Amino acid sequence: MFIKLLITVLLLSVSNYVSAKVKKTDVSKVKKKVAAKPKAKSKKAEKPKDEQKNILQPYGIEVNSTHALLVDYNTGQVLLAKNADEPLEPASMTKIMTAYMIMKALNSGHIKPESLVTISRNARQMEGSDMYLEVGDQVTVSDLIKGLIVASGNDAAIALAEFVSGSEEAFAVDMTKCAKEMGCAQTEFKNASGLPHEGHQSTAKDLFIMSKRTFEDFPKWYGFYKETIFTYRGITQPNRNVLLNDKSGCDGIKTGHTEKSGYGIVVSAVQKGRRLFLVVSGLRSMEQRASEARRLLQWGFNNFGNYTIFPANKPIIEIPVRYGVVSKVAVEPELHLLNIQRSHLEQTKAVIYYEDILVAPIKAGTKVGEVVVTHPDWSEKVVIPLRASNDVERSSFLLRIGQSLQYLFQKG
């Protein structure tokens, strides 16, 4: 049986917090700003009706991409989502998973950065963007992975796939299996390059998962995504991720484009210690892709902040324990920070659910409840596990007999 405790949270600064013992905040006394009446606009200044439809609710921001997802890395919160679970053609963003597989092989020692790869006719004849490989070239894995990431080389993708798995088809099967193990349920890879192929698909959410795992699993190799130029055979190519060259804080990760999918990008950026991941797809040009990514990223950095909802390393409640050497166990949340839109802090609500009585023995770290945090602007609720702060050993046999009698009398 679970007990439910509702807390209305008013977060005013990073030092504010609420706990199970705090009374409900009276938000009615908070002065609300009255928006100034907008000035009348001339008909010429008004946006066409088709563009006005791009205001994404409940976020209140224009989103021109067909698919979008903005996630705060530190808290895992979704700040903005548009068709994030709907299938899309990942184009060259496929290479995020291709590179992940190569990094995985490097990390395990299966291949080495200096390993030489012989370029096949298959790789040389690959259409689309390339790093200008020639049949019979002996190229290091290190150069190929840079050509894959920076120059978005389809030829590099095929060469690496053949080197690791024997064929591109086998490599694509391995990619799909690995992606699904990560939690990318709607992703199916048919090739390593991202060229159009029947059944080759992913989602904005899945592309975020792959990118996040790359950042976490292979920090040593993730640095390839920061490189702005790559030179091979005397030919220098720029990274198509132009956000690497501005002040957005971008340090990755990958662009993509096909005629069907339009222009897309997965971006990872850091400002003042906060990291955001952004996925957009379905844009009309490289210029619109860059502009959309910059605007949505800055919206996330400017309009949201990390706020402390519970004090770190401090229990928020104590739950009764039966048949233990102590009668209660302290409980604390797994997460103390949340990313909340600054203009609507008073609308954040937290509900604590926990078992009314636990039974010993209990190990420290055992989940004994959860805090569910909601906000009108969030597409998903945030669930924070509540865990026991310490071990509670089971009492002796004789003591349990006495405790049983005591519980019986209490029950009445």
Image (cartoon, rainbow, N blue to C red):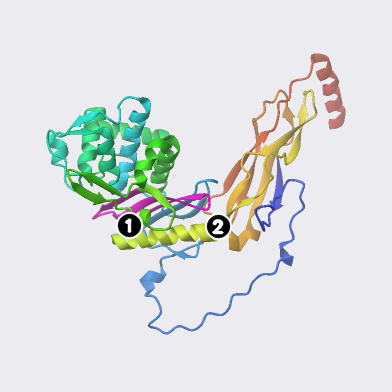
- As drawn, the label of residue 304 is 2
In this view, the residue in front, 112 or 98, is 112
Image point 33% across, 63% down: which residue?
288
Q: Residue at x 64, y 72 (%)?
A: 33
The magenta segment is 254-281
Measured as percent of width and height from the top left, residue 356 is found at 74, 36
Q: Secondary structure at mark 2?
A: strand
Main secondary structure type of the part rendered in magenta: strand
**Which residue is under mark 1?**
282
Rendered view: 289 above or below 252: below
In the rendered structure, the answer to whether residue 402 lies left or right of residue 192 reads: right
Frontmost residue, 243 versus 193: 243
Depth check, front residue: 247 or 153: 247
The disc labelled 2 sits on which kind of residue? Phe
Q: Tell me the amino acid under the disc marked 1.
A: Gly
Q: Is residue 26 visible?
A: yes
x%, y% of residue 35? 59, 75
- Secondary-structure class at tag 1: strand
Question: In the rendered image, which quarter contains the N terminus?
Answer: top right
